[in-house]
Amino acid sequence: MRDYHEFLDEILIDEDQLRARVAALGAQISADYTGTRDLLLVCVLKGGVMFLTDLMKHITIPHAIEFMAVSSYGVSVRESSGVAKIDLDVRQPITDCHVIIVEDIIDSGTTLSYIRRLLETRAPASLKICTLLNKPSRRVTPVKVDYVGFEIADKFVFGYGLDLDEMYRNLPFIGVVREGAKWNG
Ligand code: IMP
Ligand code: MG
């Protein structure tokens, strides 16, 4: 496995920027949901994990967490085929819960619109989406996003939960992969 310095083009969002923005999102959610009972954060595995654990420390409203995992079968790492399948579902009924889906990045929008439609059929009290990163220029399936950490350009990024072939999720910053760089092999 290569050292990430070999294919890191630049650090797009550093640790301090992430910390400040995640804290602000947590404060905003806390304000928006003041007085709300049954707040439930549904984290999309695996990319959303680091974001979730940092975000929830800044949410002062009592809340529960759940996890979902979906797979999409893509032709390459970059292109999603648009087919999504549920690998792990939430373990409790979400009816009457105020649900916030917590995701790492919205790219084509296919994954999130699939999850949103599925959860909507279960009649939650409300349903919002919170994503750390948003790449609006890549959108294929429109999806309403309620909370966005950072809007980014069409670049392939990694770190802070986001992977390159399952690796490098641990990095505390969001990095951009150098054009044409290989990170495995
Ligand atoms: P979508 O269905 O195309 O919106 O895909 C969203 C999923 O694709 C995310 O949850 C990520 O797992 C993955 N993804 C999209 N863009 C990137 C990226 O720049 N780096 C790493 N993973 C990405
Ligand atoms: Mg992913």
Image (cartoon, grey):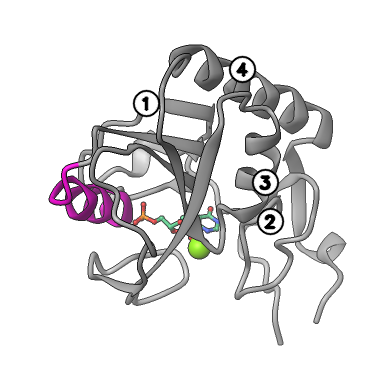
Image coordinates for residue 81, horizontal then vertical, percent: 26, 69
Q: Which residues are magenta?
A: 110-123
Image coordinates for residue 153, horizontal then vertical, percent: 50, 36
**Residue ID for mark 3:** 53
Q: CA distance from mark 1 to mark 4?
A: 14 Å
What residue is shown at x 52% (from left), y 12% (from top)? 31
Q: Earlier in the sequence, mark 3 or mark 2?
A: 3
Using the image, tell me which numbered label, if any, was put on residue 178: 2
Q: CA distance from mark 4 to mark 2?
A: 34 Å
Residue type beneath disc 3? Thr
**Residue ID for mark 1:** 146
Tag 3 secondary structure: helix
Residue 156 shown in magenta: no
Q: In the image, is 162 to the left or to the right of 113?
A: right
Foreground tag (2 vs 1): 1
Residue type beneath disc 1? Asp
Residue type beneath disc 2? Arg
Number of residues whose C-alpha sits closer than 10 Å to that of mark 4, classed few (under 14), some (14–19) or many (20 or more): some
Number of residues whose C-alpha sits closer than 10 Å to that of mark 3, classed few (under 14), some (14–19) or many (20 or more): few
Q: Quadrant of the C terminus?
A: bottom right
Observer-nearest residue: 39 or 156?
39
**Residue ID for mark 4:** 27
Quadrant of the rendered structure where residue 98 is?
top left
